[in-house]
Image (spheres, helix red, strand yellow):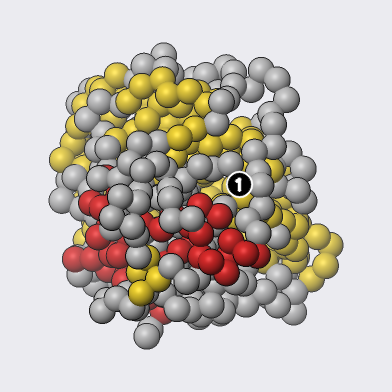
Amino acid sequence: MPRLSRLVLAAAAAVLLLAPAAASAQGLKSDNVTVVGKLPDSVGAIGARFSPDGDTMYVTSATGLGIYDIATPETPQLLSRLPLPHFENEDVDVGRDTVVISNDPSFSSVGAIYLIDVSDPSAPAIRSVLNTTFDTGNGHIANCVNDCQYLYTTGTSEGLAIYDIRDLANPQFVKTFPLPGDGFTHDVDIDSHGIAWVTGEDGTFGFDTTDPLNPQLLLRSDENVTNTGGGLPGDDGSGPLDFLHHNSLRVTDDTLAVTEEDYLKPGCDGQGSLQTWQITDERNSDGSQKLKMLDLWTTELNELASQVGRSPATVNCSAHWFDESGGLLAQGWYDQGVRFLDVSQPADIRQVGFYATGGTFWGAYFAPTDPEHEIVYALDVTSGVDVLRIDRSGALPTVRKAASITDLRRARTAFAPHARWGLVCQLPSAGVTSAVSGVTGQSR
């Protein structure tokens, strides 16, 4: 199956699995996590971004854009909504009083970039719409570059599609820019050093964007860590790069945290992971500085073995969008809730908190207006955005207990053939009564 087809199928499968997730059971949480509230009118939330001053949050969903006042982080207030016929811009971006939302042509065969004027957050208005259908197959995500004067879009093996949006009323497609390898791209994050980190099927790449139309490759993940070609049920997911590197953030001067997404794994056998990668002085064969993987963390599997909890009910086990503040990482983990991970020692990732419900969490983000960095917005696509607080007043405990080999062997017996996916979990008639416990985990 072509690589792009696997990406589209995987994304479509994630959407199809949302309805069953919404009907699942009540959640569990660690003692240091409390539920503060829920954002109004936020069902279907799949991505979020904050204004430069931190007072406003922009939430994208399958139905459009929601804008919230988060000056008081515990009680966000809905300012406005702008309906849009789009799906899906997971990583909505903002700059120069403009929110950027992309319509992914993989889902509708129509590519478009919406530039939305949010100078008055209570009255957003479309500034311009650029039809990208005839320029590129990219458009899964659109990210701002150089203070949102340019855009890079991702999604196919073309690499990056580059747009000049200095004139917001008249945005222009410039060109596509290939990356090493032939894999599809996924996300672009510009760090505080001005490096554009591009994640995708072939790993993670760091570019100098001093000349945004001609980015220069400076760094990349170890070229010897190659994609094992998975991403579908039955494919081997044991390697650190099975489907794609999904998104990244620079968490120290020399370390990146990277999501490996790999969710179509019944029983979470070969699920995605949260990884840390260190910038080294070594070189890849193309001369780029090499990133070396330090640690890899995945969630527990022992709940699967006893056929309780959420893990047996779905195949959406993967890590997804995350945010980081002061060495603490909050990560949406699809059907396994929100996981709080201590990455202050990048070679030893520790789970220090969790929150899991019957929902499907696409991301988690720290509120920039909270001086204690304890308020987190958890994007549950099935029921809306939860407002959480994690207590950081003392030392955060390790919340982990590794699944045993016996557990894993028993887990692999809990499946039966399925016409569409090949494998599904067999549940007892009164089986699923709680969310994944979150009290176990593995780091390898």
**Residue beneath label 1, please?**
440
Where residue 240 appears, as percent x and y from the top left, is 62, 67
Does any portion of residue 285 appear in the rendered image? yes
Q: Is residue 313 above or below residue 413?
A: above
Q: Is 113 on the left or on the right of 143, as rendered?
A: left
Q: Where the N terminus falls, by quadrant? A: bottom left
Residue at x 66% of width, y 52% of height: 402
- Location of residue 207 by image quarter: bottom right
Residue farthest toward the top in the current orientation of the protein: 72
Q: Nearer the viewer, residue 211 or 361?
A: 361
Where residue 421 appears, as percent x and y from the top left, is 32, 74
Residue at x 40% of width, y 36% of height: 27
Q: Nearer the viewer, residue 316 or 286?
A: 316
Q: Is 163 on the left or on the right of 244, as rendered?
A: left
Residue farthest toward the right in the current orientation of the protein: 281
Q: Is residue 396 above or below residue 369?
A: below
Specify few, some or many for label 1: CA neighbours under 10 Å numbering under 14, 14-19, or 20 or more: some
Residue farthest toward the bottom in the current orientation of the protein: 1
Where residue 60 appears, as percent x and y from the top left, is 30, 42
Name the residue type under label 1.
Answer: Thr
Q: Where the C terminus falls, by quadrant? A: bottom right
Where residue 184 appears, as percent x and y from the top left, is 45, 72
Residue at x 84% of width, y 62% of height: 281
